[in-house]
Amino acid sequence: MILPFLVCIGVSIGFLVMGIKIRKSDKPAGYYTLIKKPEVDSVKKYNNAISVLWYIASVFIIGNAVPLLFLEKDSPELVKVWIACLIWLVVLVSAYWIIDYVRSVNKKRRRRRIRRKQRVL
């Protein structure tokens, strides 16, 4: 099962490249393809958080690919690899939602502070 391992390594290298590209980007990067790019106050912090998601995805795919080297073609242990992939997907989407939620909460807090300062003045 060398070919599936090499495919997983290729995908993980692609994820690493995307993470590096996003970290160096000056514009906010969206994690999903079809979602509008978010408006953020600190582009650098947001892009760093998204790039960390891509790095974690890459490491997890490599971790899931290693058992493919030692398993036979029709091994029942492949079910564990697929379940781990599904768990990875749920964790990754949840992490993105958490980042988005924290960003929106911080945005609301900033607006409240500005309103309070305007009332005082």
Image: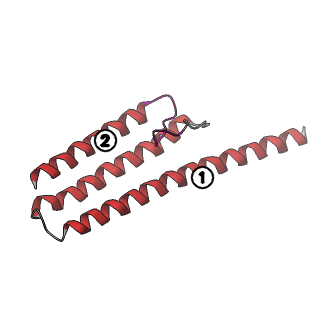
Q: Residue at x 11, y 58 (%)?
A: 69
The spot of residue 63 in percent (x, y) is 24, 58
In the rendered image, the quadrant that contains the N terminus is: bottom left
The spot of residue 73 in percent (x, y) is 10, 62
Nearest the viewer among 86 and 63 is 86
Q: Residue furthest front?
A: 74
Q: Quadrant of residue 83?
A: bottom left
Please give the range of residues in magenta. 25-35
Q: Residue at x 41, y 48 (%)?
A: 53
Residue 26 in magenta stretch: yes
Q: Residues within 10 Å of mark 1 (few under 14, many from 20)?
A: few
Q: Residue furthest top?
A: 26
What amino acid is found at the position of numbered circle 2 in the picture? Leu
Residue on which the image places disc 1: 101
**Residue 88 against residue 117 in the figure, above or below:** below
User: Which labelled disc corresponds to residue 65?
Assistant: none
* Cβ atoms at labels 1 and 2 below 8 Å apart: no
**Residue 21 against residue 105 in the figure, above or below:** above
In the rendered image, the quadrant that contains the C terminus is: top right
**Residue 86 against residue 48 in the figure, above or below:** below
